[in-house]
Amino acid sequence: MAGQVGTPVLRKEDPALLSGRGRYADDLPIPVGTLHAHVIRSPHAHADIVRIDAGRALAHEGVWAVITGADVRKLSDPFLAPVKTPVHLWALAVERVRYVGEPVALVVAESRYIAEDAAELVAIDYAPLEAVIDPLAACEKSAPLLHPEAATNEVSVRKFSYGDAKAAFARAERRVAMTVPYHRLSFTPIECYVVVAQHNPAEASYDVLANFQGPFSMHPVMARALRVAGPKLRLRIPPDSGGSFGIKLSVFPYVVLIALAARITGRPVKWVEDRIEHLIAASSGPNRITQIEAAVANDGRVLALKLDQLEDYGAFLRAPMPGPLYRMHGAVTGAYDIANVEVVNRVVLTNKMPASLIRGFGGPQLYLALERLMQRIAIELKLDPLDVIRRNLIPAQKFPYRTAAGALYDSGDYPAAVATTIGAGRLDEIKRRRDAARAAGRKYGIGFAAVVEPAMSNMGYLSTLLTPAARDKAGPKSGAVSMARIDIDPLGAVTVTADVTVQGQGHETALAQIVGDQLGLRAEDISVVLELDTAKDQWSIAAGTYSSRFASGTAVAAHMAAAALAAKLKAIAAKQLNVLPEDVELAGGKIRSRSNPDNALPFGRVGATSHWSPVLLPESMAPTLSETAVWTPGELEPPSSDDRINTSLTYGFIFDMCGIEIDPVSYQVRVDRYVSMHDAGSIINPLLAEGQIRGAFAQGIAAALYEEFSYNEEGAFLTGTFADYLVPTASEIPDFEILHHVSPSPLTPLGAKGLAEGNCMSTPACIANAIADALGVRDVVLPATPRRIHALMAGGKT
């Protein structure tokens, strides 16, 4: 059955998941004799570790070991980081703790219950130190140093200049500037971290099961920390994952910690993180303070931009950080045709949990600043915000478009997508609602946001944080590799494996559609196995599920492998059907002659030929029916000598429009109407696409109105339960309208781009602009909680 790609095929994954038969990390069998671990965490934001006395705990029946930082330092190395500073991160705190929740010791016992009981018997003495939480304060020379050997908390500063921003600002008729903070939050998956590790002393190797999501560039980081060669660390990923949203990258320190525990005890060790641990110490997106300024003509045309981006990564810069700061670097001008840009990227450390990637991966921070600035330009120049956006959008005729900072936008018609969004009476209806609400004395505002969504990251983008001279010395870093393999068994059954990790996106279904189309089979006839095993499966450092790499990467590799396999099957069938290979087609589960469809063979019979009758194969064809395809697009080049970088392969477009009303009693923001336009190129499965868009929208609403990790001035963590960290439920997420404008990517054979992160980037900015419009205020701090809205309406500080 051809033509499945582009149709809403139901998810193959759902029957097992909806019937409670999913196979998650904590569900899988464990070796006989497995011990269980519990992590003891720091109650202090900053303190020296004076003494750890584990005597009473070790005397407790069933306790096998109490592991400390001294043990970890003896048996492992600190983790590598992209920024070369004397800042060392180990799997456990060594001599000093630097954030509340930092792992200090590990108790390993016969059961989790014993381990938790014994943890209370471990005596740890601390000498508290002054903490620094505010990133601006951390940059001051008088600030407490998190890592005295680094001599500063501001561990990386890079300045970039593209075009001639200085001249543009000199000739500009107006200058508009803002300072825009983006808060710290996380996206909380249903399933927390799980690690099961074994050590083989005979081979000095480790076998680890963990719900790690990638990127697998972290595999050599873990292997190096364990002091073993890469093949000596076998990492297995379970068939199912209870969500991730980027968070499960950060399980990697625990992979090393539990592997060391298995080595020390000589037994397999399992650790399951609980929810409090996850909230306090797993990971979060970095908070950022952006000082942004535009040189503007009187008609609202932006001539140049200046951005000073100060990003707070918490107590340590864990690889692959500072990814969120640099992943969007090539796209720093967003959807706008701006030729002159100056950017300062600054990385600072504070006494918070280490930050990492979460869904949106740098986009929410960038676009909140950029889109708030575009609205502010309109207000200060007394123009319509929508007119300012449209006046600055990249014209359709300029595609493919090279941005000032080097990104190659592959395709799009942004003005047409905007016109469709506001058309059909949509904007007019929102304006009518606004006018009626304001006439009745209510607070109602309209917001817009236009963003570009990158997909399939260039693995060389992080090298932009090095100077050109340092890059030359280190050697070029660029590109991205995606892999997929297709096998046919002796009965003609087709199995697909690929370099992605399962997190709920529907990859199994999409891969089955893509392969099924090429082989003339139904999606349900294709078996897809995605429980990745680094000892057996194809993978590269780019493997994993992150940065929307599936549609532009792994899906292409699967398409290529299926096409190659189809060509091989046509050659085999041509010999048996007595026709030319060009006359052979695969359709409806058969391989047949195009000119005479009755001249046909079952797919399984032809597919099994290499197993049962290799002599029937065409000459020079190897007796195997297995195809592995590797996709590595040439557009992902290293940074240039002038620091330009194409940070991703494909670039989608999102334009959001909303109307919001503010309750005068509760001060809550109610989304009255929301419209979201997406150009994700050719859509592989509309059903999966809608699910991803709705999920990202829910998390965008959460970031705009609810979720925030909070610390007090002493570094105490204030949002360690769901009573304090407000995750919205389905009842709090408004319905919204999804539109599509399709401009297929010319850079991939499927024409597909990414779309899973878009509303995480666009929705917070759109909501913030609507709040500013409703209240007539300049600055809006997210999340816009009732307390902050009340302060804005009262004219106080937020």
Image: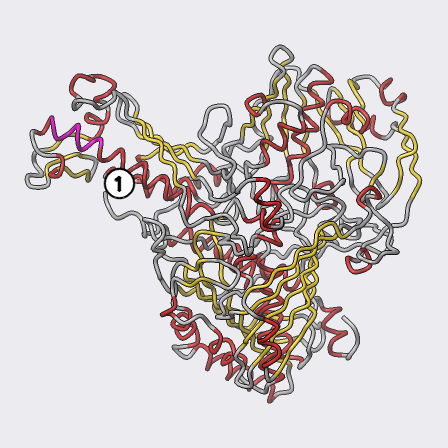
Residue 445, quarter of picture: bottom right
Residue drawn where x is 56% and y is 27% of the image: 235
- Residue wearing tag 1: 518
Note whether 217 is above or below 417 in the view shown: above
Kindly give the residue lying farthest to the top in the view shown.
202
**Span highlighted in magenta in the image:** 568-575
Residue drawn where x is 65% and y is 30% of the image: 255
Magenta stretch contains residue 508: no
Q: Nearer the viewer, residue 148 or 692?
A: 148
Note whether 268 is above or below 42 in the view shown: above
Q: Percent position (x, y) of residue 41?
A: 80, 37
Q: Nearer the viewer, residue 764 or 688?
A: 764
Magenta stretch contains residue 572: yes
Q: Amino acid at mark 1?
A: Gln
- Helix or strand or loop: what does disc 1 sit on? helix
Q: Percent position (x, y) of residue 351?
A: 80, 49
Q: Nearer the viewer, residue 118 or 700?
A: 700
Check disc 1: other Cα within 10 Å, few if <14, some if 14-19, many if 20+: many
Residue 2, quarter of picture: top left
Q: Percent position (x, y) of residue 319?
A: 64, 41
Q: Main secondary structure of the magenta part?
A: helix
Number of marks in the rendered image: 1
